[in-house]
Amino acid sequence: MMEESAHTQTMIPDILMPVQYYHGIRRDNHETQAIKRLMFAVLADAVRCFQIYADAQSHAGRRIFGVAERWILDRNNDGPFTFQAICETLGIEPDRLRDGLRRWRVEQLNGMNPRRLARRVSSARPVTLASRVRRVRRCMYERSCGA
């Protein structure tokens, strides 16, 4: 009986799902957050490519769309950067995201123009180094002239 339980214990695979791996690590761990940000960037880029190149006319655009679509639809979970693994690590239900993208694609093919995933753009106007230098010089000039 003792041999049987020892044998059973050695037969348990050493496989962890990404969720199991990250569950044991503190949420505020800097290294974990960096990996999650990278995973999110990969996922966001794939969704963006799927949406931007969905109606591409060029060969290159159709190829980019095909690569993104195959990656999203792939149910393989072998590796840390598969669609399944990334979604599970980030707490996203992969099938729901796939279904949402499929619905978006059907609406787009039916002539509707559903909104695409938009890049967030900062509302602040970018300040160039040259404008800062001019502003500093103007302030120095105003002080020296007493204006």
Image: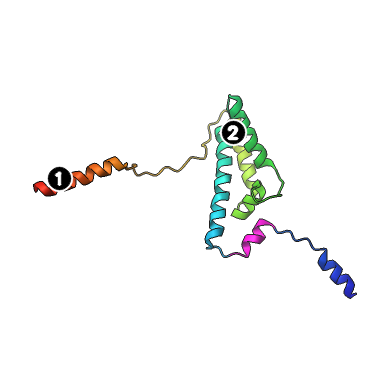
C-alpha span from label 1 to label 2: 60 Å
**Residue 18 is one of the magenta-drawn residues:** yes
Residue depth check, mark 1 versus mark 2: number of the one nearer the observer: 1
The residue to which callout 1 is attached is: 141
Q: Is residue 31 above or below residue 147?
A: below
Foreground residue among 31 and 93? 31
Q: Are marks 1 and 2 in contact (CB under 8 Å)?
A: no
Residue 69: image quadrant is top right
- Answer few, some or many: residues within 10 Å of disc 1's Cα (few below 14, many 20 plus, some between 14 and 19): few
Q: Residue at x 23, y 42 (%)?
A: 134
**Residue 59 is one of the magenta-drawn residues:** no
Q: Residue at x 73, y 58 (%)?
A: 15
Residue 141 position in % (x across, y down): 14, 45
Residue 61: image quadrant is top right
Q: Is residue 94 left or right of residue 132?
A: right
Identify the amino acid type marked 2.
Glu
Q: What stretch of residues is rendered in magenta?
A: 17-25
Residue 90 position in % (x across, y down): 59, 54
| Residue 91 seen in the figure | no
Q: Residue at x 42, y 42 (%)?
A: 121
Q: Is residue 12 above or below residue 73?
A: below
Residue extending farthest to the left is 146
Foreground residue among 143 and 54? 143
The residue to which callout 2 is attached is: 107
Identify the amino acid type marked 1.
Tyr
Residue extending farthest to the right is 1
* Quadrant location, the N terminus: bottom right
Circle 1 — which element?
helix
Of the numbered discs 1 and 2, the one sitting upstream in the chain is: 2
